[in-house]
């Protein structure tokens, strides 16, 4: 398995993500870090981490075209070019749980899935969460999923809508190529994870959610926008922030 992590100006926080990947219970994966034209020293952080962990199979590549879709697609196609049959993605502000890789492999091998979406929970180590935060974040995720199930219907789809976030998904190389990959866009234009997930639903019935594939996601964007605006942004771009790449 290959794991792709795009990053843009994440020098201050990406070490936690790298540590979480280094601590996986199943270390049999190759890590591809995609520097999306960072202007900070994120590439140095990644290179130093690689030097400190010679036991890990890891490469740092560069995608100069700005955009999460472009960076993720470059990483996935690079992995496929190296012979990857299964590729997972998380983001540089996220913490995959210790059994993340192991459980993704089980989803492919035991469940026969071709596309896997995991569950997201809020990080608690970077930004303090109040009791209100801990209640409202799961509620917003539930609303987003229900909205999708009600509005993303059609005979062209081969299984019901699932909430597939770019920071916690995996796919077979064959299906990724058949689906056309992540659109090479910025998040301001298109949510590339949703676009890929919706294409996949038209091509296979073997897509699903695994509750044991868990990633903790930073809440920095929700904290900056507020919860209502965050929901409007993610669900349908009904509101657009001035600054999307919150640091």
Image (tube, helix red, strand yellow):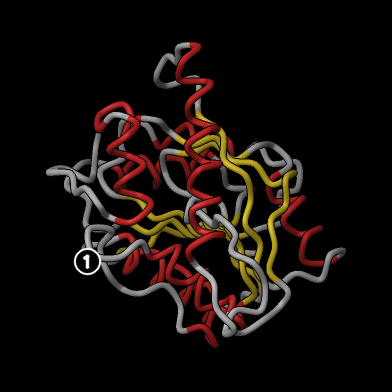
The number of discs equals 1
Relative image position of residue 89 (x, y in whole percent): 53, 57
Q: Residue at x 28, y 49 (%)?
A: 8
In screen coordinates, is 152 left or right of 116?
A: left
Which residue, as the protein is rendered here, is positioned at the far bottom?
178
Compared with residue 2, is residue 134 higher up or lower down, i.e. above or below? Answer: above
Q: Residues within 10 Å of mark 1 (few under 14, many from 20)?
A: few
Q: Quadrant of residue 230?
A: top left
Front residue of this view, candidates 43 and 227: 227
Secondary-structure class at tag 1:
loop
Q: Residue at x 48, y 48 (%)?
A: 144
Relative image position of residue 150 (x, y in whole percent): 53, 60
Q: Quadrant of the C terminus?
A: top left
Q: Which residue is mark 1?
A: 64
Q: Quadrant of the N terminus?
A: bottom right
Q: Residue at x 55, y 78 (%)?
A: 154
Relative image position of residue 77 (x, y in whole percent): 46, 77
């Amino acid at each position: 398995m290959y794991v792709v992590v795009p990053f843009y100006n994440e020098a201050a926080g990406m070490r936690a993500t790298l540590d979480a990947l280094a601590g996986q219970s199943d270390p049999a994966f190759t890590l591809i870090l995609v520097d999306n034209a960072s202007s900070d020293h994120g590439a140095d952080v990644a290179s130093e981490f690689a030097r400190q962990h010679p036991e890990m199979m890891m490469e740092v590549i560069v995608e100069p075209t700005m955009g999460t879709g472009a960076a993720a697609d470059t990483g996935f196609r690079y992995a496929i070019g190296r012979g990857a049959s299964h590729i997972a993605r998380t983001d540089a502000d996220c913490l995959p749980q210790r059994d993340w890789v192991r459980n993704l492999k089980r989803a492919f091998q035991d469940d026969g899935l071709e596309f896997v979406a995991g569950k997201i929970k809020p990080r608690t180590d970077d930004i303090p969460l109040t009791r209100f935060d801990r209640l409202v974040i799961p509620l917003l995720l539930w609303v987003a999923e229900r909205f999708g199930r009600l509005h993303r219907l059609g005979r062209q789809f081969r299984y019901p809508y699932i909430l597939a976030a770019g920071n916690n998904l995996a796919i077979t190389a064959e299906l990724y190529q058949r689906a056309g990959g992540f659109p090479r866009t910025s998040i301001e234009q298109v949510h590339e994870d949703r676009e890929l997930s919706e294409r996949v639903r038209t091509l296979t019935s073997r897509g699903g959610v695994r509750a044991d594939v868990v990633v903790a996601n930073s809440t920095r964007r929700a904290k900056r926008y507020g919860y209502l605006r965050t929901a409007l942004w993610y669900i349908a771009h009904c509101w657009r922030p001035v600054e999307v790449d919150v640091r």
